[in-house]
Image (cartoon, coloured by chain):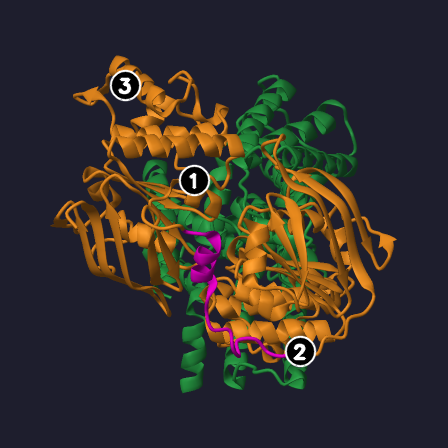
């Protein structure tokens, strides 16, 4: 094919213990919109990081052929010089600089180091017209919404004379109107001969604009579909995304489901910074004793926000709605009240919200419930060591001893410390947010066993996860969240990945 | 023997600064031809540094909680001037004055803590403002003059020594008696802790190490007390200092509040999600430092026997340096009270030793600065090696 602009051949990238990309092949033709789809963790972002030089040449195996030449990008500036620009999901704009300053950041219009403001503004103005943004170039980026910020990013890319534009979930945080504008812009670029790679979870968008679709799963290319020749339907894409072997990855459990332990009604939460954004919208859920309840949905669909706002209003503002625990209305307005009510929240981000990394295993385990190991405020060190050792044994935490700092443990063992910490608080209701993120298969299985045991002991467990197989393998009942709403409820017996995906998208 | 060496190696980081302090003391002892450890000089060393040591204890908690306080020197001066005005101009009783000043100090600290914890203004800015405010208020209070002298009983805080019931006026026997009683208590508690650990089936350091450590503590305490006893005995302020060190070392290592301060400084978000009342705790650490700064201000004023507008200038830097030399982390969550005390002593011994050698204040500053940088460098280097 002579019109191929980019060809990635046999790309393999390994992280310690994980093969993130395994012999991936990926071709983009001149002037097409090529969609890259796959589950969270399938390797989409990693592949794009290889392409843009964030992982430098030599860090991966395989070849990148761009415009007929083999490229060896050592840093992001190299790929930008070649006309490849990546726009990340989290925008990389400086909030307190103006739009014009942001557009030309690192690429300033200047003579002898002195910025030429006239030229900067005039060129910025022209670029803003191109992307259809009617704002003054002097406006500060912090004063415009996310949708407009996205357009500023694109204007910035255009200023670098982009040939190949990579967008990583550009519409994830946009409303429908802004998404629509953005997609139209991509179609216009296509006419001008600019190629785009679009990473997206929204298959309806993909269907609408893409010329080709490449599906990644577990770091491998599954297939590339050509949308110009044949009819493509969503089922076909979904099957490619999720189809994998599911045998024996989850321990068995005999569910003994009891009475309702937690009920949430009309739970509504607004974004802590953007008052007008509703992140959880009238969510309702019930949880029973002995039940493992799954919450599926994309990142940003309101899962974590729901959990954290329930747990002592740790997230969001203007929280309304009611929570009933064991039938009585519960006051969950502070973390301490939530803990006293029997709630525990195991965070998805254990390094930021879960562990005090500089402290040892013992201190982390006992932090939530120091009363248990102290007499009139004075800690009984011996009792503490004894109990910490008990948890270490029970959950098979691999550390040299309980006085080892948690920063030096592996991800799986860190997760077990966080779990121990919350179990030490003696909760009835556990909310586990992405409990197996970033840990290896063996440790995952151990965590599943712990979850099952907790349910058998009569606790109510909520598992939030982006991995559908995990949700399906563990849970008795599943809620699917989408754009802040509980979009659907499925019983384990009737649930399938396809059905969940339907609710998500 | 090999087990002793192993235990020593494992603890070399913990005892690193202590060893450095001893080396520095030996160095100056030799270079000053024995003046450093003369009984009179040791007494002076304690008196000269007592206020820095008192504040270092409070500062350590603030630094562990992840903050900083630049205003302690100004608070010292402000409290000193308040005490002076109360006692000298209004003839208020010394005991009443001390209590009022301590309460005032705690309130000042709480005030600053409020801005840091609840309004979320960085502590650097809040206390920089406090540094200016309280320096200014000191000038207002004293109207630019020095106010003194103080009543005798107030001066005793700094210049007094414990009375000698037993001695003959030559050698202060009561001091030695207190030292022996203290050591008996230390050994008693150490043995008890060791028994408890064995009862639980935990590993304990080999008996040789246990013996060696206790022998070392005994030798050091007896030696220092013998030096002090051959002059005028234990200074009152050393008793205060000692009590504070024991109390705060206990709070930081053995109590729930202490543990939570470390968690707060190590990872505020995680601590908050674990039910730690982070705001209240930050306010508490600042209020506590305010209280200790007030005490230091009183001790300093009593020592000079006059309150001056310039009192306490630059104290904050010595106090902060002491904490960092003693192994505290600038990002919070790491540090010990004993470390801060040792850090302050390192600074104090260097000041004293260099003064005896006749090195000018200009070079002293430069050398102290380099020592601070080196001490923290070793800490960072050690960490990166692990």
**How far, Cα to Cα, is label 2 from label 1?**
40 Å
| Magenta span of residues | A232-253
Mark 2 is surrounded, within 10 Å at the Cα level, by few (under 14), some (14 to 19) or many (20 or more) other residues, namely few
What residue did someone put label 3 on?
Answer: A123
Labels 2 and 1 in the same subunit:
yes
Mark 1 or mark 3: name the one nearer the start of the chain. 3
Q: In which chain is the residue bearing label 1?
A: A
**Figure check: B222 above or below A90:** below
Q: Position of residue B75 (x, y in %)?
A: 60, 33
Q: In which chain is the residue bearing label 2?
A: A
**Figure check: A24 above or below B345:** below
Mark 3 is surrounded, within 10 Å at the Cα level, by few (under 14), some (14 to 19) or many (20 or more) other residues, namely some
Determine the residue positioned at 81% across, 69% down. Answer: A258
- Which one is in front in this view, the residue at disc 1 or the one at disc 3? 1
Magenta span includes A237: yes
Mark 3 or mark 2: name the one nearer the start of the chain. 3
Name chain B's colour: green
Mark 2 or mark 1: name the one nearer the start of the chain. 1
Determine which quarter of the picture holds residue B122. Answer: top right
- Give the side of residue A330 with respect to residue A246, left or right: right
**How far, Cα to Cα, is label 1 from label 3?**
24 Å
**In the image, farthest residue toward the front:** A230
The front one of A111 and B105 is: A111
Determine the residue positioned at 38% across, 57% down. Answer: A215
Residue B231 visible in the picture:
no
What residue did someone put label 2 on?
Answer: A253
């Amino acid at each position: 094919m002579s019109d191929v602009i980019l060809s990635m051949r046999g790309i393999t990238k390994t992280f310690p213990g994980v093969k993130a990309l395994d012999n991936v092949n990926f071709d983009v033709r001149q002037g097409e919109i090529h969609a890259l789809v796959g589950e969270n963790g399938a390797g989409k972002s990693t592949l794009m990081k290889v392409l843009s030089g964030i992982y430098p040449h030599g860090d991966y195996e395989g070849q990148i052929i761009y415009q007929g030449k083999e490229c060896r990008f050592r840093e992001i500036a190299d790929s930008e010089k070649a006309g490849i620009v990546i726009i990340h999901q989290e925008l990389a704009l400086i909030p307190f600089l103006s739009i014009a300053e942001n557009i030309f950041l690192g690429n300033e219009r200047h003579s002898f180091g002195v910025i030429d403001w006239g030229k900067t503004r005039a060129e910025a103005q022209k670029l803003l017209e191109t992307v259809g943004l009617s704002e003054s170039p002097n406006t500060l980026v912090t004063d415009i919404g996310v949708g407009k910020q996205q357009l500023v990013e694109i204007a910035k890319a255009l200023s670098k004379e982009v040939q190949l534009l990579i967008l990583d979930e550009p519409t994830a945080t946009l409303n429908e109107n802004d998404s629509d504008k953005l997609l139209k812009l991509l179609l216009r670029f296509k006419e001008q001969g600019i190629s785009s790679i679009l990473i997206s979870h929204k298959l309806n968008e993909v269907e609408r604009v893409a010329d080709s679709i490449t599906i990644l799963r577990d770091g491998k290319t599954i297939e590339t579909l050509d949308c110009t020749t044949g009819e493509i339907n969503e089922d076909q894409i979904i099957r490619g995304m999720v189809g994998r072997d599911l045998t024996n990855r989850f321990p068995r459990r005999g569910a003994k489901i009891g009475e309702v332990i937690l009920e949430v009604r009309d739970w509504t939460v607004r974004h802590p910074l953007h008052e007008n954004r509703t992140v959880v919208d009238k969510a309702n859920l019930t949880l029973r004793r002995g039940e493992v309840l799954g919450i599926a949905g994309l990142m940003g669909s309101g899962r974590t926000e729901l959990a954290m706002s329930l747990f002592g209003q740790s997230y969001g503002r203007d929280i309304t709605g009611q929570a009933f625990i064991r039938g009585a209305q519960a006051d969950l307005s502070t973390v301490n009240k939530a803990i006293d009510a029997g709630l525990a929240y195991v965070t998805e981000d254990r390094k930021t919200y879960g562990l005090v990394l500089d402290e040892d295993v013992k201190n982390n385990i006992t932090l939530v419930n120091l009363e248990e190991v102290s007499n009139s405020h004075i800690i009984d060190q011996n009792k503490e060591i004894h109990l910490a050792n008990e948890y270490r044994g029970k959950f098979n935490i691999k550390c040299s001893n309980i006085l080892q700092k948690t920063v030096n443990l592996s991800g799986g063992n860190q997760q077990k410390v966080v779990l121990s910490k919350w179990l030490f608080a003696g909760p009835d209701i556990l909310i586990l947010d992405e409990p197996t993120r970033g840990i290896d298969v063996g440790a995952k299985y151990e965590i599943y066993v712990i979850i099952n045991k907790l349910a058998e002991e009569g606790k109510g467990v909520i598992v939030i996860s982006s991995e559908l197989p995990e949700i399906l393998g563990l849970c008795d009942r599943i809620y699917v969240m989408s754009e802040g709403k509980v979009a659907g409820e499925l019983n384990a017996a009737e649930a399938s990945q396809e059905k969940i995906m339907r609710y998500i998208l | 023997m090999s087990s002793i060496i192993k235990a020593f190696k494992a603890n070399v980081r913990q005892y690193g600064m202590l060893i450095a302090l001893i080396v520095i003391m030996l160095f100056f002892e030799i270079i000053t031809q024995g003046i450093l450890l003369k009984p009179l000089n040791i007494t002076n060393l304690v008196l000269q540094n007592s206020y820095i040591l008192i504040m270092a204890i409070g500062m350590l908690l603030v630094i562990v909680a992840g903050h900083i306080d630049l205003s302690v020197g100004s608070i010292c001066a402000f409290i000193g001037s308040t005490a002076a005005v109360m006692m000298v101009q209004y003839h208020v009783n010394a005991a009443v004055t001390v209590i009022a000043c301590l309460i005032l100090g705690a309130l000042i600290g709480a005030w600053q803590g409020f801005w840091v914890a609840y309004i979320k203004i960085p502590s650097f800015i809040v206390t920089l403002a406090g540094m200016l405010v309280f320096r200014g208020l000191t000038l207002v209070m004293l109207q630019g003059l020095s106010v003194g002298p103080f009543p005798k009983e107030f001066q005793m805080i700094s210049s007094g020594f414990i009375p000698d019931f037993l001695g003959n006026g030559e050698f202060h026997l009561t001091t030695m008696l207190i030292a022996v009683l203290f050591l008996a208590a230390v050994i008693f508690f150490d043995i008890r802790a060791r028994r408890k650990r064995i009862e639980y089936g935990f590993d304990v350091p080999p008996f040789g190490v246990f013996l060696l450590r206790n022998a070392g503590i005994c030798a050091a305490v007896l030696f220092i007390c013998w030096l002090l006893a051959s002059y005028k005995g234990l200074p009152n302020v050393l008793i205060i200092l000692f009590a504070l060190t024991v109390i705060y070392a206990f709070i930081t290592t053995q109590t729930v509040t202490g543990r939570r301060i470390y968690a707060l400084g190590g990872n505020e978000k995680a601590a908050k999600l674990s039910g730690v009342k982070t705001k209240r705790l930050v306010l508490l650490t600042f209020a506590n430092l305010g209280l200790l700064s007030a005490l230091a201000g009183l001790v300093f004023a009593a020592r000079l026997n006059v309150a001056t507008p310039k009192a306490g200038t630059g104290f904050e830097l010595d106090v902060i340096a002491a904490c960092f030399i003693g192994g505290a982390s600038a990002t919070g969550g790491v540090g010990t009270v004993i470390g801060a005390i040792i850090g302050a002593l390192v600074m104090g011994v260097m000041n004293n030793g260099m003064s005896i050698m006749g090195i000018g204040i200009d070079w002293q500053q430069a050398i102290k600065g380099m020592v601070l940088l080196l001490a923290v460098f070793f800490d960072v280097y050690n960490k990166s090696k692990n």
